[in-house]
Image (cartoon, rainbow, N blue to C red):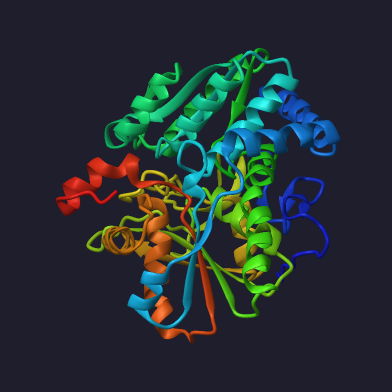
Amino acid sequence: MSLKIKKNIPLIDQHDENFMYGGRFGGNFIPETLKKPIDDLTKLFSKLRKDKNFLKERNHYFKAYVGAPTPFIKLENLTEHLGGAQIYAKVVSEANGGAHKIYNATVHCLIAKKAGKKFIVGDTGAGYAGKMLSMAAKKFGLKCKIFMGAKDIKRQRPNVEAIKKNGAEIVPVTTGSQTLVDAVSECMRYWVSNCDTTHMCVGSTVGPNIFIKICAWSTAQISRELIRQVKDEFGKIPKKLKLINCVGGGSSAVGFWNEFMETQAEFIGVEAGGPKNSKLHAAPLTNGSKIGILHGAAQYVIQDKEGQIGSTKSISAGLDYPGISPLHCFLKDTKRAKYTSASDEDALKAYQLVSRLENISPSLEPSHAFAEVIRIAPKLKSSEIIICNSCGDSQKDKDIIKQRLGSYIR
């Protein structure tokens, strides 16, 4: 089956009447108890995204609260060190709170207010989605509860402390792998019982269709800024342009690529390949995973021989997820985007090199993307342009980095 992306239609709207992208990915595989709240939220968002006053409000907070636009800079030292392509970075980690998750959190809180909800819940792995939601909830006067795997609570201590400081409650998830996949599951279970008073924010472009749409629509702010910045820098969009982004759930990559969808820009997504000496990884797109259902949506997902959700392993909590956004599955099968993976060790080396040479310090998530930049840049001509999304700051990973490398470069 040959899939195609339709022109002049937003990526998030390229689904059929069953909310399936290409007839294969996405959908709403949800219990009957969630049908009404999902339908209500779908109708509300459909109205709000066309409402001039809501758009004005969103844009105001993106500028005055989030800090838009985030910087677009050339990495002169890294370019000279590697040779080959010219390397740039969109430094989204300069957004309020230190990562791209602030866009989705802000929009969800605005929607919660419009829906008359006083409570908001969310999931988190790396802690950034939880940190940003706790920040936005405090800003907009909402009571907040964050579900987080017990394993991630231990390895992402700085963000855990930030969530608590913002007044949100952290609910430790001790089932399964005690990571992001289990946090999402528990968050959804909680929402089923409390949807009358509580709004749910899914932290990435995963889950039932409406959550994919809201998240992708929110993070598209990254590429709305970037496409203007690229035109200002080069006078036009370069013919040989590669946009490289890490991919876990996939929210930052969709946001990074969205406005370039109908250009000639090449999209490269980098998944978490896991430890070099392990068969475990968090890279379903680059390891031939089959389609399965996870968190209410059909997608490529890591599974065991019995078809159950398989185990994953990554040094990066934000990429440590067995599935992938249905949007990325669609982009892969339409061949609009290419996907590869980087190991834990390559991500650590990339973090070291970039932090030493440049005035940015990427978290372990975008360090996977920088590993791909480091791999391919020397093979390219100097006329070619690479832009990497530095979507998160390394502050949350300082304990892991110290443990693995012996020192932390800020």
Q: Which residue is at 18% across, 54% downward? A: 405
Q: In terms of depth relative to the viewer, which is nearer, 135 or 192?
A: 135
Q: Is residue 305 above or below residue 135?
A: below
Quadrant where the N terminus sits is: bottom right
- x and y percentages locating residue 145 in the rendered image: 49, 19
Q: Residue furthest left?
A: 406
- x and y percentages locating residue 190 in the rendered image: 53, 20
- x and y percentages locating residue 274 in the rendered image: 32, 57
- x and y percentages locating residue 161 in the rendered image: 34, 25
Q: Is residue 87 above or below residue 316?
A: below
Q: Which residue is at 27% across, 32% downward? A: 154
Q: In terms of depth relative to the viewer, which is nearer, 278 or 368?
A: 368
In the rendered structure, the answer to whether residue 187 lies left or right of residue 162 reads right
Q: Is residue 171 visible?
A: no
Q: Is residue 82 visible?
A: yes
Q: Which residue is at 37% across, 70% downward? A: 78
